Amino acid sequence: MTITIDMSQFHGVFFEECFECLDAMESGLNALDLEKIDLDQVNSIYRGAHTIKGGSATFGFNAAAEYAHTLEKQLNDMRNGATTITPPIRDILLNVINSFRIVITDLQNKQDSNDDTTKHQDDLQAELDKLTQA
């Protein structure tokens, strides 16, 4: 006997958690002292991306999971000191978070296949690409 679980019943909790993570990531970035980086704060920001990545993958939101993975990788480089957090990099990260809010909102509204979501995902990828080149 196979038991099938309707994962959509958990979407509300997932979306709420995503928005909480994005808010915490934004607050953490805005509070970050770029002259004296607090690694605990960077770790907290990283954990937000990690949480979103895992939840997105669990629910089959693969594009969101891929973007979160790319963001997570960039934040990991910052945690490890491979990338220095500068004002322009922080601005890009804040733009990524704002773009991610739109993507999550579109998923929440079941608009994950429309042109606007695709554009937001393309914008998000472009911002992440800027991070890689920074």
Image (tube, rainbow, N blue to C red):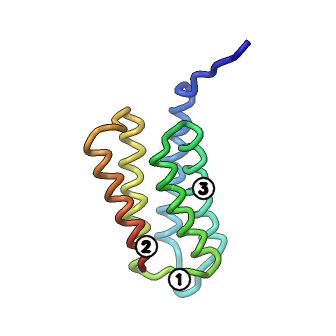
Q: CA distance from mark 2 to mark 3?
A: 17 Å
Q: Quadrant of the N terminus?
A: top right
Question: Does residue 132 sit above or below 109 in this rendering?
Answer: below
Type of amino acid at the residue the image marks with label 2: Leu
Residue with the mark numbered 1:
84
Residue 31 in the image: state x and y as whole percent.
51, 72
Which of the two discs, 1 and 2, labels the residue nearer the N terminus? 1
14 or 5: nearer the eye?
5
Query: Which of the 4 image quadrants contains residue 73?
Result: bottom right
Type of amino acid at the residue the image marks with label 1: Thr
Q: How many marks?
A: 3
Q: Quadrant of the C terminus?
A: bottom left
Type of amino acid at the residue the image marks with label 3: His
Q: Residue at x 70, y 16 (%)?
A: 2
Question: Does residue 93 sit above or below 116 in this rendering?
Answer: below
Tell me, yes or no, whether the two marked residues, 2 and 3, touch with CB atoms within 8 Å. Answer: no
The residue furthest left is 115
**Label 1 Cα crowd, 10 Å radius (few <14 / some 14-19 / many 20+):** some
**Label 3 Cα crowd, 10 Å radius (few <14 / some 14-19 / many 20+):** many
122 or 99: nearer the eye?
122
Q: CA distance from mark 1 to mark 3?
A: 20 Å
Residue with the mark numbered 3:
50
The residue furthest right is 1
Q: CA distance from mark 1 to mark 2?
A: 11 Å
Specify whether 116 is left or right of 104: left
Residue 19 in the image: state x and y as whole percent.
48, 47
Residue with the mark numbered 2:
131
Q: Residue at x 38, y 47 (%)?
A: 103
